[in-house]
């Protein structure tokens, strides 16, 4: 085990302790067979199917409950039919039987496979309409039938009228997947909701019923792929022992139209196969991977493909042999030629160069390779150039590789967003990136148009989300974190949806249909990200370092490499604060189009959310708010922390419309969030004050602790 993996191991232990403290149900409430407590324990997610209470709308629905007609007998259509039966029984109290003999009948719901020209992407689109006295759910594919069925049930759960019903929808992205950073020992890297869902020690003999509920939840959002294991992969997943285990999980996913993928350890030919090299151009290595892929497809005929992290953070890769990322990816793609699988190659790379800017690393390594990747390869790019920060500018890779399909990698799990104790609704983060304009083909060339293929004509398109699920009874630790899983799924299907639309939908399906309560919850959800940024990393601060990625430690300056320290990113000194990425600094701005550079090149014109990403600003510099940098920072830190009290008030106002168990769970976590927001505020303000040499502005209460006392509290936290 390398030093890096030891660090990750101990980080997982620390994370687990914090996760357990935040979610006492922890690993003991480990699945569908765990005893559910009274009230809403969050297990049903957004598939609660609670009885329709609007009498007139219910009577409309009941007119179409005579039968469920299935025009096909495929496994996924049968899944859709079974879901309809469950949904109608719970929503309307009506048991409805399925039949393949329904010609000439009316008053039912018909699931129909359409033939003829396909105008929907990969046939996964669906149409729902009233015709011949029936509700018709139609698609070119079984997957589309399943997605249409869930859309109809969502419509019913929202208690919307069925009069004049006519809906059609197709996914804008072809591969919509979750990336699980789950390890064979049951730990989850950056996981805050208990242990892994996958019980490898039980598989393949026992298949946990929770896998089915996981598949249902994903299919209801249109997610069609899942990567089961950590990108810091173990070679054991390439062994026959684990391939058989993965096949057992895949058999569950298949019924819901979900393909199973694996992360691979690039050096597996050496560590597992006994070869002397893992050089991607070596004939024996290429033959080993071809044989391995054939072995997988023998057990999993619909296997999705490989996800690869290589030559990043100590992981092995093709550069170990003087080869390029394209050489490595193309070698794996060659092994998939006889099959439908793909290779997803991550662009999260950066070297330990004390003179470099990590911001620039992915662009420098990948843009020269544009056009050199096999058609079966998708390069997966994080939304920002650093590492899932609370706010980042969009990655400059988007728009600069027109000959290479680029997939989006979002993070759903809250690595830098407060773990399982802070309520942060992430849809605004996703939307901020997707709606950013790259200007690669002029105005309107958004990141969304890059990843959906419409800008460059990609046929293979992908959006991936690093999962936030664990075996905690409510799946995600924090009940409101379920909304982030939901938001990712809905946006991967249709990136044109708004954050507000998704929040309103999720609240009604998951928490309450009390309109007044819903408005209070929606209000604080939509503001939660900005509130978090204000007390955590305002005006473009960032803070990654090698640790548990939560404790406020802006003074941290010791690491095995400069970019694994905090001071590398904020660059506070007696003059000012921020990372100069203009021509006078690292010149990272040059990686963007001139129109984007113009927005961010002048500190007086750069929007405040990105100011310190691109400029080292004097403490006394007057900003557009009329305040100096120091005054603005203090204002953000203080108002951000104080705004958590407002979030608590909004949650309290929603209490009459909420399940008591859900209310109490979130209310208690908000108390923790309030305390930790003050912790972050004090750590930053006291530390930066040593450089700014200025008092906290009038109107804000001075800190009750000294910097040394705060440092001591952080050290105690890290020792837990």
Image: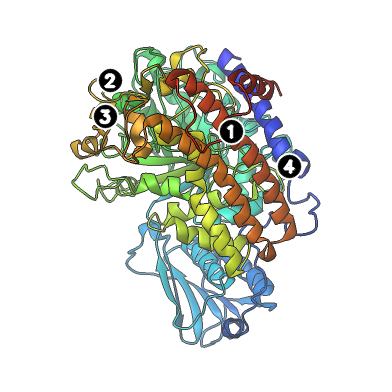
Identify the element where label 1 is drawn.
Answer: loop
Residue 589: image tag = 3
Q: Could you give the CA–CA distance between mark 3 and mark 2, rounded to whole angstroms?
A: 10 Å
Q: Could you give the CA–CA distance between mark 1 and mark 2, rounded to whole angstroms?
A: 32 Å
In the figure, 53 relative to 619: above or below?
Answer: below
Q: Name the residue under label 4.
A: 205
Image location (x, y in percent) of residue 542: 44, 29
Whether pointer 1 and pointer 2 mark residues with C-beta atoms closer than 8 Å, the reply is no
Q: Quadrant of residue 518?
A: bottom right
Identify the element where label 3 is drawn.
Answer: helix
Q: Name the residue under label 2.
A: 585
Q: Could you give the CA–CA distance between mark 3 and mark 4, rounded to whole angstroms?
A: 54 Å
Is residue 313 toward the left or the right of residue 107 in the image? left
User: In front: mark 3 or mark 4?
Assistant: 3
Q: In which quarter of the image is residue 61?
A: bottom right
Q: Name the residue under label 1.
A: 190
Q: Nearer the viewer, residue 651 or 437?
A: 651
Q: Could you give the CA–CA distance between mark 1 and mark 3, rounded to whole angstroms?
A: 30 Å
User: In front: mark 3 or mark 2?
Assistant: 2
In the figure, 19 relative to 684: above or below?
Answer: below
């Amino acid at each position: 085990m390398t030093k890096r993996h030891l660090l990750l191991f101990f980080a997982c232990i620390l994370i687990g302790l914090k996760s357990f403290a935040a979610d006492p149900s922890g690993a003991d409430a480990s699945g569908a067979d765990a005893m559910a407590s009274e009230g809403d324990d969050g297990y049903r997610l957004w598939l609660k199917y609670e009885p329709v209470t609007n009498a007139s709308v219910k009577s409309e629905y009941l007119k179409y409950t005579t039968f469920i007609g299935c025009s096909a007998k495929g496994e996924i259509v049968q899944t859709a039919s079974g879901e309809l039966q469950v949904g109608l029984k719970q929503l309307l109290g009506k048991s409805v039987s399925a039949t393949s003999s329904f010609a000439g009948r009316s008053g039912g719901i018909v699931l129909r496979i359409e033939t003829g020209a396909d105008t929907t992407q990969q046939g996964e689109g669906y149409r729902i309409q009233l015709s011949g006295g029936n509700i018709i759910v139609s698609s070119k594919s079984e997957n589309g039938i399943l997605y249409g069925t869930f859309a109809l049930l969502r419509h019913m759960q929202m208690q919307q009228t069925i009069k004049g019903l006519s809906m059609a929808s197709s996914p804008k992205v072809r591969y919509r997947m979750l990336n699980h950073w789950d390890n064979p020992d049951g730990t989850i890297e950056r996981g805050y909701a208990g242990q892994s869902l996958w019980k490898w020690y039980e598989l393949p003999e026992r298949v946990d019923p929770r896998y089915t509920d996981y598949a249902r939840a994903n299919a209801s959002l249109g997610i069609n792929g899942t990567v089961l294991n950590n990108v810091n992969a173990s070679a054991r997943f390439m062994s026959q022992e684990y391939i058989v285990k993965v096949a057992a999980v895949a058999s569950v996913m298949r019924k819901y139209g979900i393909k199973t993928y694996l992360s691979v350890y690039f050096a597996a030919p050496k560590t597992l196969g006994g070869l002397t090299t893992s050089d991607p151009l070596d004939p024996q290595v290429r033959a080993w991977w071809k044989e391995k892929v054939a072995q997988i497809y023998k057990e999993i005929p619909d296997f999705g493909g490989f996800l690869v992290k290589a030559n990043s953070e100590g992981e092995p890769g093709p550069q170990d042999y003087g080869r390029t990322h394209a050489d490595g990816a193309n070698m794996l793609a060659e092994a998939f030629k006889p099959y439908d699988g793909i290779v997803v190659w991550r662009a999260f790379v950066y070297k330990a160069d004390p003179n470099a800017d990590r911001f620039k690393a992915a662009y420098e390594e990948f843009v020269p390779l544009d056009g050199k990747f096999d058609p079966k390869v998708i390069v997966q790019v994080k939304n920002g150039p650093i590492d899932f920060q609370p706010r980042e500018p969009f990655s400059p890779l988007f728009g600069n590789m027109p000959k290479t399909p680029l997939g989006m990698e979002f993070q759903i799990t809250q690595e830098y967003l407060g773990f399982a104790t802070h309520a942060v609704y992430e849809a605004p983060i996703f939307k901020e990136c997707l709606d950013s304009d790259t200007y690669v083909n002029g105005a309107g060339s958004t990141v969304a148009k890059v990843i959906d293929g419409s800008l460059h004509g990609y046929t293979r398109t992908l959006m991936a989300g690093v999962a936030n699920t664990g075996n905690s009874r409510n799946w995600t630790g924090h009940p409101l974190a379920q909304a982030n899983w939901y938001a990712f799924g809905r946006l991967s299907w249709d990136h044109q949806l708004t954050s507000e639309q998704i929040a309103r939908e999720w609240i009604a399906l998951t928490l309450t249909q009390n309109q007044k309560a819903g408005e209070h919850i929606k209000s604080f959800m939509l503001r939660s990200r900005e509130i978090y940024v204000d007390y955590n990393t305002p005006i473009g601060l960032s803070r990654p370092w090698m640790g548990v990625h939560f404790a406020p430690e802006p003074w941290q300056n010791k690491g095995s490499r400069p970019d694994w320290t905090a001071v590398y990113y904020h660059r506070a000194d007696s003059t000012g604060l921020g990372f100069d990425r203009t021509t006078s600094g690292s010149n990272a701005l040059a990686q963007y189009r001139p129109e984007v550079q113009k927005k961010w090149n002048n500190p007086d014109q750069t929007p405040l959310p990105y100011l310190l990403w691109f400029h080292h600003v004097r403490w006394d510099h007057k900003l557009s708010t009329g305040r100096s940098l120091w005054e603005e920072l203090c204002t953000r830190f203080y108002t951000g922390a104080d705004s958590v009290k407002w979030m608590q008030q909004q949650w309290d106002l929603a209490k009459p419309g909420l399940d008591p168990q859900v209310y109490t769970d979130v209310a208690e976590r908000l108390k923790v969030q309030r305390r930790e927001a003050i912790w972050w505020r004090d750590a930053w303000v006291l530390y930066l004050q040593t450089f700014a040499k200025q008092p906290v502005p009038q109107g804000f209460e001075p800190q009750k602790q000294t910097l040394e006392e705060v440092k001591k509290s952080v050290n105690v936290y890290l020792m837990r």
